[in-house]
Image (cartoon, rainbow, N blue to C red):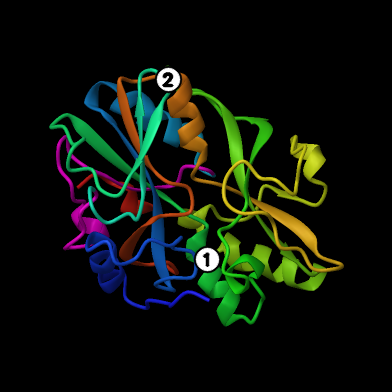
Amino acid sequence: MMTTIASPEQLRRLIRAKSFANPTTGQAGGYLQGNLAILPKAYADDFLGFCVNNPKPCPLLGVSRPGERSIAVLGDDLDIATDVPFYRVFRGSGLRNRVEDLSADWRDDLVSFVIGCSFSFEESLQRARIPVRHIEAGRNVPMYVTNIETRPSGPFHGPLVVSMRAFSPADAIRAIVLSDRQPLAHGAPVHIGDPAQIGIKDFDNPEFGDPPVVAPGDIPVFWACGVTPQMAIRNAGPDIAITHEPGYMLVTDVPAEGASIGLNAAH
């Protein structure tokens, strides 16, 4: 089992020092974690429209000014270019590199979008003594591409990606209620039960993350996932785009419970 870091600031410092390179699920419990999308300013308005059109997979936590590596409302010492364990850097050809920091790739025209993550409500589940099976197994959460289409904005379009957690029927009901209280962490699930109904063909082999952990009698529950924008960004094809590696999030100083939609304003 990996060591659990309670403080978001401590976790970011460890990541910045290249001393923490694990998925952030289960870390800094009680604080919002964020998916990351970084795009040239020329694409920022259309991507903002994509987030507005698709609030379940893309609940905005914050937007930076062009070229800035911080968003003050999310953390005083937060550095977008160093505080995620692994990033994906996409080029116009569709090829991507996995990097530990963005110093070599940063540009003055880049705008950063931080989008809510379902990892943020997992601590609420654990406090309610609801087993979160991938955390208990030391795994990343499984994430799947579905046949549900998002609402497009300019060149941004593509399928919804979902994350999955399996529960007993009673715990599934409680997990739905608890997650619904955190709209900035994707809120309530988008599907319960048969994966095939949302176009998942190989449940045991997700497109992102690790294979699922399912106990006898469990029901799979699917939440909208912040990896969804990565599919839309691939379709838009900017000359450069940067995201987090799925499962490796930006951990903020914002408490998960009680966080408001008003957090979305750019800073």
244, 229: nearer the viewer: 244
Specify few, some or many for label 2: CA neighbours under 10 Å numbering under 14, 14-19, or 20 or more.
many
Q: Which mark is residue 121?
A: 1
Q: Name the spot of residue 18 as percent of width and height, x first.
A: 27, 61
Q: Which mark is residue 196?
A: none
Dot 1: element: helix
The total number of labels drawn is 2
Vertical order, 196 against 70 (above or below): above
Can you tell which quarter of the image residue 158 is in? Answer: top right
Q: Name the spot of residue 107 as percent of width and height, x first.
A: 16, 32
Dot 2: element: helix
Q: Name the spot of residue 248 as percent of width and height, x first.
A: 42, 54
Q: Are marks 1 and 2 in contact (CB under 8 Å)?
A: no
Mark-to-mark CA distance, 1 and 2: 30 Å
Left/right placement of residue 229 relative to residue 265 reads: right
Vertical order, 143 against 166 (above or below): above
> In the rendered structure, which amino acid carries the disc numbered 1?
Phe
Which of labels 1 and 2 is toward the front? 2
| Residue range highlighted in magenta | 57-80
Is 69 colored magenta in this rendering?
Answer: yes
Left/right placement of residue 134 relative to residue 202 reads: left
Q: Is residue 15 something one can see in this rendering?
A: yes
Q: Is residue 259 something one can see in this rendering?
A: no
> In the rendered structure, which amino acid carries the disc numbered 2?
Ala
Label 2, on which residue?
Answer: 236
Which residue corresponds to the image point at 44% horizontal and 63% vertical from the top-left? 24
Which residue corresponds to the image point at 52% horizontal and 65% vertical from the top-left? 121
